[in-house]
Image (cartoon, rainbow, N blue to C red):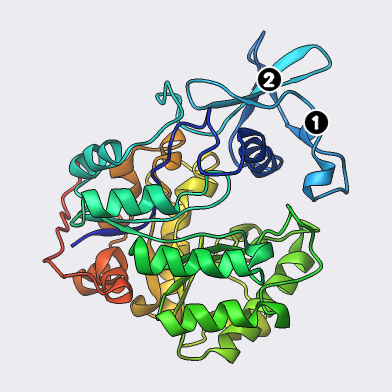
Amino acid sequence: MIVDCHAHVFQHWQGDCGHPSSNVHLKYLQKVVTRPSARAFRFRDGKEIKPSMLFHPGQNTWDGLTDVSFRVGRYGQLAFTYEGDDYYVQYLPVGMQELVCPPELIIAQMTVAEVDHCILQAGGGYGAMNDFNAFSQHQYPEKFTGLLHVDESLVDQPQTLAEVDRAVKRLGLRGLYYAQDFSRHGYSRNVDHDDFRPFWEKITGYGLPVFIELSSTPSYDLAGYLTNLAALDALLSRYPTKRFLLVMGPPVGHFGNSGSWKFPEDVLSTYKRENLQIEVMFPISWGGVWDYPYPQAQELIRGMRDLFGATKLIWGSDMPNVERFCTYRQCVDYVRRYCSFLSASEKELILGGNAAELLQLQRKSLNINEKEH
């Protein structure tokens, strides 16, 4: 069984998408694209630009976002106006004429790519998707497993703890997606803060696996990432039996730019913790730089296998977003067909077995086609 540990369904981005208002949703989206791997352009002549006008330099909370009439466009575009000119970030694939992704769209993509099951992640930019993830999971239980998401900065609040109870007991969501970016409310607390202990105790009590995505905020540099990784390490140590998955995997820009991994010892010791697994996910962040079938990514996967073993690694795509760089099938095949250094049993673990074990999914035989087309 091939399992994608990182996919999304979402309601039309023109609306509030579960947030208190569409304005809140737009703030999340604007923050997401202040430093995107997606490309940005000027409407009138197609000139490529850097979207630095979306925020004030050095101000990395929502207070630093500029007023540029940020809005949801069409064809995968998030648009804005600056000094009389219109611009857009090509955040979703051009073929998405409307910025909406119902479960049936992902199922159609899964059929062509020969993916059996998707784990539905969430996050502020996509919307407050607990209800929609649960709807998709209950409509298509053989295809989807939904994760819950809450505002990470407010997990010490009673209403947030109540939402966790609702998401698990009433909605039946089966894991937690936790983004580490606290830009909405400021960076005074990190994931391991004592105020958040009741939240983590609740997650532990429910036995939910945690899909945690680390950023390098607020400084957007190596020092920022190392600070956030140290906070995660404290959490891993505090809850040694709690299962975590590092979403997006190690940052190539910090540790893999030479073509192979070069991890400081303290970083490596965190990545090697027994209760941490690592997502294998390169096209979404480097597909605009590297060409399919991503030989650079293949070498980094080899390095991860050699350092951590295949049981540590779980493949994910970030569908439908990844299709701005490659097709869904290509996102599977750069591992399934081109990582020839992986044995069949290692591919089975990375492409499905490890995720199935983490979420306790019913196992099927893995469909690995070694032939190239």
Residue 217 screen position, x and y as percent: 74, 59
Q: Which residue is mark 2?
A: 87
Decide: is 338 above or below 1: above
Q: Which residue is at a point 42% across and 41% down the rendered structure image?
A: 10
Q: Quadrant of the C terminus?
A: top left
Do the CB atoms of the residues marked 1 and 2 lie less than 8 Å apart?
Answer: yes
Name the side, left or right, on which 201 lies relative to 253.
left
Q: Is 114 displayed left or right of 254 in the figure?
A: left
For disc 1, the neighbor class at 10 Å (few under 14, some 14 to 19, many from 20) is some
Q: Quadrant of the N terminus?
A: bottom left
Residue 64, horizontal then vertical, whole percent: 84, 43
Q: Which mark is residue 53?
A: 1
* Amino acid type, mark 2: Tyr
Estimate how packed mark 2 is, as few (under 14), some (14 to 19) or many (20 or more) residues with alpha carbons within 10 Å. Answer: many
- What is the quadrant of residue 37 in the picture? top right
Residue 238 percent location from the top left of the image: 59, 90
- The residue closer to the viewer here, 329 or 102, is 102
Query: SS class of the residue under badge 2?
Result: strand
Tell me if residue 174 can be seen.
no
Give percent across and percent down for residue 351: 28, 63
Which picture quadrant has residue 291?
Answer: top left
Residue visible at 42% across and 78% down? 306
The residue sitting at the left extreme is 365
